[in-house]
Image (spheres, coloured by chain):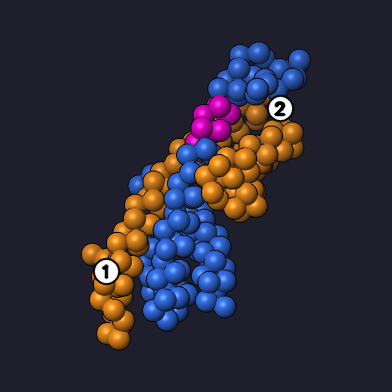
Chain colours: A blue, B orange
Amino acid sequence: MRKAVDMPQTDPAALAELDRLRSTIDNLDAALVHLLAERFKCTQQVGQLKAAHGLPAADPDREARQIARLKSLAVEADLDPEFAADFLDFIIAEVIRHHEALQG
Amino acid sequence: MRKAVDMPQTDPAALAELDRLRSTIDNLDAALVHLLAERFKCTQQVGQLKAAHGLPAADPDREARQIARLKSLAVEADLDPEFAADFLDFIIAEVIRHHEALQG
């Protein structure tokens, strides 16, 4: 299904290496999508629980703890901690949209 | 380390359930951060390879294939396919910044 990049002037060994790396990236992306699906299952449950008990959709203290923890994990994993924080913001924005939809 | 949300008027069983879900979310987030770190290791290698061989940083055909594939995986995993596409855009924007830094 996947095809080597068609650039005749480029070293075939480099193109083979590019294909190898892209295949690994595709596997990691599949894993990321499945973990995200599982994460949203959990946050949907959190949203239902919060809606049932009148708890607010957003929780700034919890989010601050999550961001600090993920930044620290990112440093250990050699990932830019600011990117990890932006990533969490990106996901939390989506979660809050879901929760507001449940409560609204 | 983690503490139950302190809301005395809320059913303790609901707070325990909220804590349980948050603990799972924290585990999923740690896994996501480590997979992202591994993904950026691969894309850094792709960036170096592209820079060494004068290949362009962005590859719209490859990105279109990745987006279509991830949307399809998202549907199977019961994740909003538009969110999966936005997620990939978010990561690719970061990757292109890295690649341009290598080539610039």
Query: What residue type is disc 1 on?
Result: Ala
Could you tell me residue B17's position as x and y percent? 30, 66
Q: What subunit carries mark 1?
A: B
| Mark 2 secondary-structure assignment | loop
Q: Which is more toward the observer, B10 or A18?
A: B10
Asked whether residue B6 is drawn in magenta, I would say no
- Identified at 27% across, 85% down, the residue is B8
Hey, which quadrant is residue B35 in on the image? top left
Which mark, by number, is residue B16? 1
Question: Considering the image in quadrants, where does the C terminus of chain A appear?
Answer: bottom right
Crowding around mark 2 (Cα neighbors within 10 Å: few <14, some 14 to 19, many 20+) is: few
Residue at the farthest left position? B1
The answer to whether residue B71 is above or below residue A92 is above
Could you tell me residue A102's position as x and y percent? 53, 72
Query: What residue type is disc 2 on?
Result: Gly
Asked whether residue A26 is drawn in magenta, I would say yes
Evaluate whether residue A34 shows in this view. Answer: yes
Give the magenta-colored segment's residue range: A21-28
Which residue bears the numbered disc 2? B54
Could you tell me residue B29's position as x and y percent? 40, 53
- Which circle's residue, 2 or 1, is located before the other in the chain? 1
Evaluate whether residue B99 shows in this view. Answer: no
Q: Main secondary structure of the magenta part?
A: helix
Residue at the farthest bottom position? B9
Q: Which is more toward the observer, A86 or A60?
A: A60
- Identified at 25% across, 76% down, the residue is B12
Could you tell me residue B67's position as x and y percent? 66, 41
- Identified at 64% across, 19% down, the residue is A15
The answer to whether residue A100 is above or below residue B32 is below
Hey, which quadrant is residue B61 in on the image? top right
